[in-house]
Amino acid sequence: MAIGKQQIGALLVSADPLFLNERDKLVALTARHVLPAIYADRELAEAGGLMSYGASRTEAYRIAGNYVGRILKGENPGNLPIQQSTKTEFVLNLKTAKSQGLVVPPSILASADEVIE
């Protein structure tokens, strides 16, 4: 595969339904090539990826639920303000870091919202 032939030092994976659906394959690929990767979706870090940093899906669902509630109570959707999640989550998979031979500085560990061991 081309990724093994390139001299890539790290990988940044954006939020995309394809990447989320194929997370096990993507995480296995980065593990096979010992390629540190940061993902936008926490599910990839939970699946064995090194880390994720992105908008909180829980917060986004809470906002969507509030919209639905307001609409069901009779508010006009066109009159509702546009909102988006402002909460971000940083998830660090320490097990993956160790398997890749990475030493995580204490300052990075302390800044993680969740550490998977």
Image (cartoon, rainbow, N blue to C red):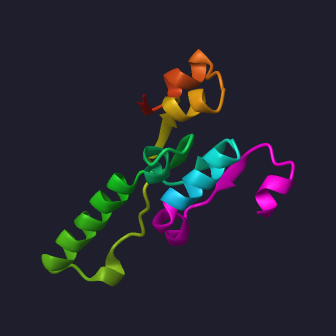
Q: Position of residue 44 (x, y in %)?
A: 49, 52
* Residue 10 within the magenta-colored segment of the rendering: yes
Residue at x-position 67% and y-position 41%: 36
Relative to 23, is 63 on the left or the right? left
* Residue 33 within the magenta-colored segment of the rendering: no
The tally of labels here is: 0
Q: Position of residue 19 (x, y in %)?
A: 55, 65
Which quadrant of the structure image shows residue 98? top right
In the rendered view of the protein, which quadrant contains the N terminus?
A: bottom right
Relative to 77, is 2 on the left or the right? right
Residue at x-position 30% and y-position 81%: 77
- For the question of whether residue 86 can be seen, the reply is no
Q: Position of residue 83 (x, y in %)?
A: 41, 64
Relative to 22, is 64 on the left or the right? left
Q: Position of residue 28 (x, y in %)?
A: 57, 52
Query: Quick one: which residue is furthest to the top in this view?
Result: 106
Relative to 80, is 86 on the left or the right? right
- For the question of whether residue 64 can be seen, the reply is yes
Residue at x-position 48% and y-position 63%: 20
In the rendered view of the protein, which quadrant contains the C terminus?
A: top left
From which residue to which does the magenta span run? 1-23
Q: Is residue 9 above or below residue 59?
A: above
User: Which of 75 and 112 lies nearest the eye of the viewer?
Assistant: 112
User: Which of 106 and 82 lies nearest the eye of the viewer?
Assistant: 106
Residue at x-position 65% and y-position 48%: 32
Q: Is residue 56 above or below residue 70?
A: above
